[in-house]
Every structure is written in structure tokens, then in C-alpha cells.
């Protein structure tokens, strides 16, 4: 018990440092991660084994891909084209990017989508001379919403799909309807929250509309090769099971190929300027800290508490799983959290008995973890990656800035998910 209390104390202290920004979030996570080893809460082998290297190398691989593609001028081309289609109107651009992010995330995954689209929207806002933060935050929210709709859209769903025999179609049939409701209502929220704040000068709009985006492509040969590699990478992602490859291997193969062809003379620049090591090491520390909560039995206590509250009644259990997952995913990165929750759901099946009654619990876990991750800055992988990209480009989005928006959208998402689970399955 004393080890569990120590683990909770380290987690709480780390969380406070991240929220208050007294020290850099990466430093807070790494210090917390190694304190759990120094205190003997878990040993070094266990702590290091908890690091999801598939996630780490997937991120590095995607950063390499984005680095080379940025050199071609493609992102600037898309940025100007998008802004011109929206006639340079910020609110219209925000709504367009929100929908685009949600749709693309369902098929490319939330993290991949964020790594591709956030640099684009930051270029647009820079040209219009407006604050990028609301655009980045709402796109992150959209990525987690859209990612919840499919088995490959968000890391928690990938883990749930691996733990069950659900097909890609099962996820689409059961999760796309609530996601459509949530995305639609979120568009209204965006309009209500930002309609009076999106001001841009006529001069900036006029200047933007005069741009000739066709002149922005710097290297057509590299562009075509990059797009070819990108398509191959996305096809490989969709055929992972057949190929027997993890996402990290695919992303690293694509990234290293592009660097070898397009940036082989600038490898040091790529490694020092284009890889966001702050985000990478933040993830590493976070995985280590969360593992201490798993190893000391804290997650098992949550599972036992769920059963005590619901007494195994399926509808009540679904509601508790949904909201417990939503709340905890807001404060613990949802990747390690859902990994810890899957055994809990499997234990609940012993009490509930009927396999058919287990389906709503899995969908509740999916919606809770994917959508609850929007609650705070560290709730989901896409959030952390987006903030890292923003920081890398000189934009600081604080924990408070993200959370005061994220909580509103998360509550809306959770309430709609509750209604959906309640009326769809019971």
C-alpha cells in the first residue's frame, strides 16, 4: 500500500508541475519517471519495459516524413489554397479545418493527421497575422473525435481492436453515429465560442488572396517522390495485419527513406531542428510514471470499485466505464490508460457472463478514452504532439489555455455518448 501511495504522490507532484508550468513539462515527466525507480516503486527493467517504443519510433518516423515534405513547399501550398477557398475568413477556415481534421483522423489516425495539418494551419494564421492557438486547440479536439470513429483512428481503438475480435466494420457501425453527432454539435460550439474573436484586417486578407500558390512548390521531383512514399506508408498502415509490421517500423522506413533521398546532406539539421525531442522524452517519462500506478495495483482498485458500484448490472457498468474512462483519460495519457483498462473490462466479463452484454462496455471504453482525452493538454497523444509542434514554432499553449476549451467540448462529447450508449444498447 505504501508503494501505491508513493506512486500517487509522484504522479500528483508531476501533474502539478505540468499544470503550473513551474518547470518544462518534459523535465517534470522525466524527473517523475526516474523518481519512481529511485524510490523502488518499480525497478528499472519494469519502468523501461513500460515505454511503448512503437509509439516513440512512430512519432520520430512521422517527424522525419514531415521534415522532408516541408522542404518541398507542399504545406505552404495547401495552406494558401485552403485560406483562399475560405476567402481568408478565419472562422470559416477554423470550421473547415475542424471537419477536415475529424474526417482525415478517422482514416490516417489522430497523431498522423495532427502532424500533417497543424503545420499547415500555423502557416495560414501567420499569413493572416492572427493567433494560432484556437485553431490548433480545436483541430486537436477534432482529431480525437474523428479518431474515435474507426479501429485505426485513435491509439485506444487500436488497442481495443487487438484485445477483441471486433472488425474494422464493427467499429464503424457502432462508433461512427455518436462521432457524427459530436462533431456536428462541436461545430455549433466553435461558432458560439469564436464568432466574435476571429478578426483579420482587410489588408492581410487582400494580401493573402493575391498569393500565387503555384509558385510555392520548391522541388517538384522531391514532392512527387514524397507523395509516393506517403501513399505507400498509408497503405502499409491499413495492411498492418497482412504485412505483420507495426506502425513504428512503417513510419521509420518511410522517414528514413525520405531523409536518405531528400535531406541526406542535412541530417544534423533534421535531427536537431525537426525532431521534437521535448515531446519524445515527455512521452517516455509519462509511460514510466503511469506504469507505477499499474504495478502498485491502483488500476485494479478502480476495477474493483466499478463492480462494487454497479454490482455487475450491464447498463450501470457501461455508464461507469464510460465516465471513469473519460475522467481518467483527461488526466492520464489515454494510451497507457486504456492498456491498463482492457484487463479490467476482461475481468468484468466474468461477473456479467453473457458475451453479448459485453459489447456496450467495450464501446463505452472506446468513447470514454478517446473523447475524454480532449479534457486536458496531456489527455491524448495527439494533444501532446500538437502542443510540441506549436512550441517548436514559437507558439506557447499553456495547460490552462487548452483545458478551459477542452473541458467544454469533452463534457458535450461525454453527454452525447451517454445518451447514445443508453438508448442504442439498452
Image (cartoon, rainbow, N blue to C red):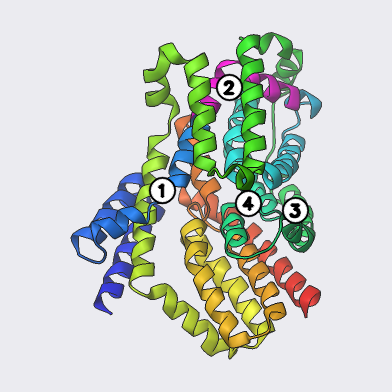
Q: Is the Cβ of the residue at disc 2 closer than 8 Å to that at disc 4?
A: no
Would you name the residue on which mark 1 appears? 283
Q: Tell me what residue is drawn at x 70 percent, y 44 percent.
A: 107
Which is nearer the N-term, disc 2 or disc 1? 2
Which is nearer the N-term, disc 3 or disc 2? 2
Would you name the residue on which mark 2 appears? 69
Could you tell me residue 264's position as x and y percent? 44, 14
Depth check: give the residue in front, 11 or 263.
Answer: 263
In space, the residues marked 2 and 1 are separated at their CA atoms by: 24 Å
Depth check: give the residue in front, 246 or 211.
Answer: 246
Would you name the residue on which mark 4 appears? 144
Q: Is the Cβ of the residue at disc 3 closer than 8 Å to that at disc 2?
A: no
Q: Tell me what residue is drawn at x 50 percent, y 38 percent.
A: 249
Q: Secondary structure at mark 1?
A: helix
In the rendered structure, find residue 121 and report the number of the disc placed on it.
none
Please tell me how crowded label 1 is: few (under 14), some (14-19), or many (20+) other residues with Cα within 10 Å.
many
Q: Tell me what residue is drawn at x 65 percent, y 20 percent.
A: 74
Could you tell me residue 252's position as x and y percent? 49, 33
224 relative to 274 in the view: left or right: right
236 relative to 192 in the view: left or right: left
Which is nearer the N-term, disc 3 or disc 1? 3
Q: Secondary structure at mark 3?
A: helix
Amino acid at each position: 500500500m505504501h508503494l501505491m501511495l508513493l506512486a500517487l504522490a509522484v504522479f500528483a507532484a508531476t501533474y502539478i508541475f505540468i499544470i503550473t508550468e513551474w518547470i518544462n513539462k518534459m523535465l517534470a515527466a522525466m524527473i517523475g519517471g526516474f523518481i519512481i525507480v529511485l524510490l523502488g516503486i518499480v525497478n528499472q527493467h519494469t519502468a523501461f519495459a513500460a515505454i511503448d517504443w512503437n509509439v516513440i519510433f512512430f512519432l520520430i518516423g512521422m517527424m522525419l516524413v514531415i521534415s522532408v515534405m516541408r522542404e518541398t513547399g507542399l504545406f505552404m501550398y495547401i495552406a494558401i489554397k485552403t485560406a483562399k477557398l475560405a476567402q481568408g475568413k478565419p472562422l470559416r477556415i477554423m470550421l473547415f479545418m475542424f471537419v477536415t481534421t475529424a474526417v482525415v483522423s478517422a482514416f490516417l489516425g489522430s497523431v498522423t493527421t495532427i502532424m500533417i495539418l497543424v503545420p499547415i494551419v500555423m502557416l495560414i494564421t501567420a499569413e493572416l497575422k492572427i493567433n494560432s492557438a484556437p485553431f490548433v486547440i480545436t483541430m486537436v479536439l477534432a482529431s480525437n473525435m474523428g479518431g474515435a470513429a474507426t479501429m485505426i483512428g485513435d491509439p485506444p481503438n487500436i488497442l481495443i481492436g487487438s484485445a477483441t475480435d471486433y472488425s474494422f466494420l464493427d467499429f464503424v457501425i457502432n462508433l461512427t453515429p455518436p462521432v457524427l453527432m459530436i462533431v456536428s454539435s462541436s461545430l455549433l460550439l466553435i461558432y458560439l465560442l469564436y464568432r466574435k474573436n476571429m478578426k483579420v484586417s482587410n489588408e492581410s486578407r487582400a494580401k493573402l488572396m493575391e498569393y500565387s500558390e503555384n509558385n510555392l512548390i520548391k522541388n517538384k521531383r522531391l514532392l512527387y517522390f514524397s507523395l509516393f512514399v506517403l501513399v505507400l506508408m498509408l497503405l502499409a498502415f491499413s495492411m498492418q495485419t497482412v504485412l505483420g509490421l507495426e506502425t513504428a517500423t512503417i513510419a521509420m522506413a518511410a522517414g528514413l527513406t525520405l531523409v536518405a533521398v531528400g535531406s541526406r546532406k542535412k541530417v544534423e539539421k533534421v535531427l536537431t531542428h525537426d525532431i521534437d525531442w521535448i515531446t519524445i522524452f515527455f512521452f517516455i517519462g509519462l509511460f514510466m510514471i503511469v506504469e507505477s500506478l499499474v504495478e502498485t495495483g491502483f488500476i485494479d482498485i478502480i476495477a474493483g470499485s466499478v463492480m462494487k458500484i454497479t454490482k455487475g448490472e450491464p447498463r450501470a457498468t457501461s455508464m461507469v466505464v464510460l465516465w471513469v474512462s473519460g475522467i481518467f483519460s483527461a488526466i492520464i495519457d489515454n494510451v497507457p490508460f486504456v492498456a491498463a483498462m482492457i484487463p479490467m473490462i476482461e475481468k468484468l466479463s466474468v461477473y456479467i457472463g453473457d458475451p453479448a452484454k459485453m459489447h456496450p462496455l467495450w464501446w463505452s471504453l472506446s468513447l470514454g478514452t478517446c473523447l475524454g482525452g480532449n479534457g486536458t493538454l496531456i489527455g491524448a497523444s495527439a494533444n501532446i504532439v500538437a502542443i510540441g509542434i506549436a512550441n517548436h514554432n514559437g507558439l506557447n499553449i499553456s495547460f490552462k489555455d487548452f483545458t478551459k476549451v477542452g473541458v467544454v467540448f469533452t463534457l458535450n462529447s461525454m453527454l452525447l455518448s451517454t445518451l447514445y450508449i443508453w438508448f442504442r444498447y439498452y
